[in-house]
Amino acid sequence: MIPITIPVLEESEAQAAAAVVMSGWLSQGVVVAEFEAEFSRIVGAPHACAVSNCSSALHLALLTAGIRPGDEVITVSHSFIAAANAVRQCGATPIFVDVDPAMFNMDTGLIAAAVSPRTRAILCVHQIGMPCDLARIVPIARKHGLIVIEDAACAAGSEIEWDGKFQPIGTPHADVACFSFHPRKVITTGEGGMLTTQRADWDRNFRMLRQHGMSVGTFERHRSSSVVFETYKQAGFNYRMTDIQAAVGLQQLRRLPELVRRRRTLAKAYGQMLADIPEVTPPVEPIWARSNWQSYCIRLPEWADQLGVMQTMLDRGVATRRGIMCAHLEAAYRDNQVRFPLPHSEAAHQHCILLPLFPQMTDVMQEEVIAALRGALVGQDRAGH
């Protein structure tokens, strides 16, 4: 079986985790601080705050941005449901706009029409690692006085051209970026997330809210030479990262450049192989973006049955995933008014699939994936004609 992905975890991660276990300090300690500092250095952000996962990162970003009940946040339905959920958790309403059919990211031409007197922010998604068009999104937001939050869950290692040079996603292009370290991502801590920002006041608020609203963190209190009593001026959350996770994360960060390089090589090879299947559309990487290729999403011919293709490939030992979900099609969002048509979002969900892509893939594995795809399509074509 060729799986959809495999995390790259080796002996160094196990040893780093074991060292934390033996140290006796397991949560929100010095190793978390080291992980934050190294992530901050790599992406070029003044501040980085580690949390339990990207969903909690999105929640803290929205709360700190001042999103409250009755507000509206412009975002996409075509994304994992966590983005829309985070808006709902603030009591606000996600206003869905459609995606560009080539890159699967927010169609920037639709943003202005979605702005209303209640709009407070734009939550844009770097879908499956492909950077969205921040160079257009940010000026639109500034014109309307809106906050920009990047859902960069999949985008560690991706880059965008900004002021004539390529910079990592997470560099302060917007107000805050939120990352995930789930096992499906390019680097992993098992679970975990990170917020990066240039705003020191926002970073302080993230740190307070992630630890129940404590005025003084546990680690700072532990290091103090005098007795310190914390206070709780507002209700917070238990969104802490453990030092065990952070120790794994530090090892993963050392691997990040090579992991991204390998993924880009594999993505290029897929593109060349798919040239022999003209009815299949490979993903598009614009000249101003460099994806980390967290996932490789292809568009099937309109006549192809998505489920049938996926099942035939699975029967041949190749795992796939369907196109990115649409939150507005889920029962949880039936009561959320869809203000604008979302044809490209729905089409991508129904006609796209994700192919296996992970650094350990061999040339033979990729050839088997393409052979399984070709066989699945030929079988359907013959059956249908």
Image (cartoon, helix red, strand yellow):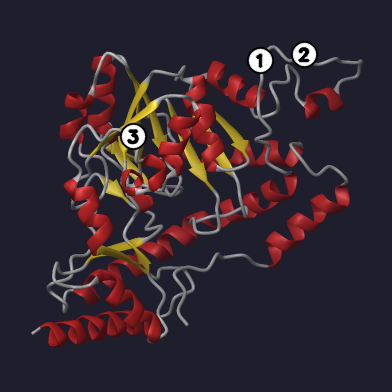
Classify mark 3: helix, strand or loop. Answer: loop
Residue type at the position of mark 2? Thr
Q: Residue furthest right?
A: 226
Q: Quadrant of residue 94?
A: top left
* In this rendering, the label closer to the viewer, 3 or 2: 3
Q: Find disc 3 in the rendering and name its residue.
A: 336
* In this rendering, the label closer to the viewer, 2 or 1: 1
Distance Cα–Cα, label 3 vs label 1: 29 Å
* In this rendering, the label closer to the viewer, 3 or 1: 3
Classify mark 2: helix, strand or loop. Answer: loop
Say which of 207 and 9 sits in front.
207
Q: Find disc 2 in the rendering and name its residue.
A: 231
Say which of 64 and 244 sits in front.
64
Classify mark 1: helix, strand or loop. Answer: loop
Q: Earlier in the sequence, mark 3 or mark 1?
A: 1
**Rendered residue at 43%/49% (across/down):** 154
Q: Looking at the picture, does residue 40 appear above or below residue 378?
A: above
Crowd class of label 2 (few under 14; some 14 to 19; many from 20; radius 10 Å): few
Residue type at the position of mark 1? Gln
- Residue 371 drawn at (x, y percent): 28, 85
Q: Looking at the picture, does residue 321 appear above or below residue 126?
A: below
Q: Find disc 1 in the rendering and name its residue.
A: 234
**Rendered residue at 42%/84% (across/down):** 317
**Rendered residue at 26%/63% (across/down):** 352
- Residue 239 drawn at (x, y percent): 65, 35
Q: Are marks 3 and 2 in contact (CB under 8 Å)?
A: no
**Rendered residue at 20%/43% (across/down):** 342
Residue type at the position of mark 3? Asn
Is 365 on the left or on the right of 303, as rendered?
right
